[in-house]
Amino acid sequence: MPQSGLPDLIVEPVVRAALAEDLGSQGDITGRAVIPPGTRTRAQLAAREGGVVSGLAVAALAFRLVDPALRVVPRSADGAACTPGEVLMTVDGDAAAILAGERVALNFAARLSGIATATAALVAETAGTAARITCTRKTTPGLRALEKRAVLDGGGFNHRFSLSDAILIKDNHIAAAGGIGAVLSAARAAASHMVRIEIEVDRLDQIEEVLAAGGADAVLLDNMETATLRAAVGMIAGRLVTEASGGMTPGRVREVAATGVDYISSGAITHSAPALDLGLDV
């Protein structure tokens, strides 16, 4: 069975909810009407375009929850590259059960593979640099754990999973709390020794304030031009972890990575990644 890196305890409620939504109150009335009871078949889940695979374990779980007797055999693995026509998984067993789970399994695998593929495209742009691609909290409600796992499958890294993971001070926090010095002082006083503090800036003069105030572990360089990013990295000189964010398209990531930033965050790899074209054929 392919390993998603996530325990079924986390994944199963999400998949059960998706199956309940799709099967409705009466189950698959089409399959029940047209497929003779006891009909057995084999189906192949295949890639119709190239990309990076993710969500195979989730798709397999969808089939198993519909019918534990189905035999699901992976032919690839999450995080692997795939080519058009490549068979990623086979499913043997009751035909009606396979077709009842088909759409949910494909929805998960296509969505998550799309995220992994989009992530891998940005990661490729950082080759030869120390920059790492990371995601954000711009995820589909209820699917964050799965989508962030897909980012890892694409070679990226995860930002915080929730508001409780770390202190990330943004522009609105600064405005509401009375300025950079005040907000950093309050954050450091409230943070435990296990909690890191990151602060967002969009101007070079704010970096001077951050460095003077102390208390931050990382700085988020938001919506800066490439030349400004390079200057910001020089000012910080390794004293803080640097993260660049805002408009990180494949065409721009390479030049941003070359500025020396530690991380490049992208919301698009989760909220706007196109699904990878996958299909299930009996």
Image (spheres, rainbow, N blue to C red):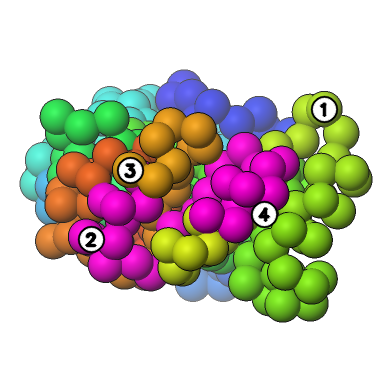
Residue 152 covered by magenta stretch: no
Mark 1–mark 3 CB contact (< 8 Å)? no
Q: Residue at x 52, y 54 (%)?
A: 208
State which tag comes first along the sequence, 3 or 4.
Answer: 4
Considering depth in this image, is 25 or 253 the residue closer to the camera? 253
What amino acid type should be assigned to the residue bearing mark 1? His
What amino acid type should be assigned to the residue bearing mark 3? Gly
Question: Residue tagged by mark 1?
Answer: 193
The residues bearing labels 2 and 1 have C-alpha atoms spaced at a distance of 34 Å
Q: Residue at x 48, y 64 (%)?
A: 205
Considering depth in this image, is 1 or 190 the residue closer to the camera? 190
**Element type where label 4 sits in the image:** strand
Question: Residue tagged by mark 4?
Answer: 168
Residue 189 placement (x, y as % from top left): 89, 44
Mark 3, other Cα within 10 Å: few <14 / some 14–19 / many ≥20 = few
Considering depth in this image, is 207 or 242 the residue closer to the camera? 207
Mark 3–mark 4 CB contact (< 8 Å)? no
The residues bearing labels 4 and 1 have C-alpha atoms spaced at a distance of 15 Å
Q: Residue at x 38, y 26 (%)?
A: 73
Image quadrant where residue 178 sits: bottom right
> What residue span does the magenta drawing correspond to?
208-233
Question: Residue tagged by mark 3?
Answer: 234
The residues bearing labels 3 and 2 have C-alpha atoms spaced at a distance of 13 Å
**Element type where label 2 sits in the image:** helix
**Element type where label 1 sits in the image:** loop
Mark 2–mark 1 CB contact (< 8 Å)? no
What amino acid type should be assigned to the residue bearing mark 2? Thr
Question: Residue tagged by mark 2?
Answer: 226
The residues bearing labels 2 and 4 have C-alpha atoms spaced at a distance of 23 Å
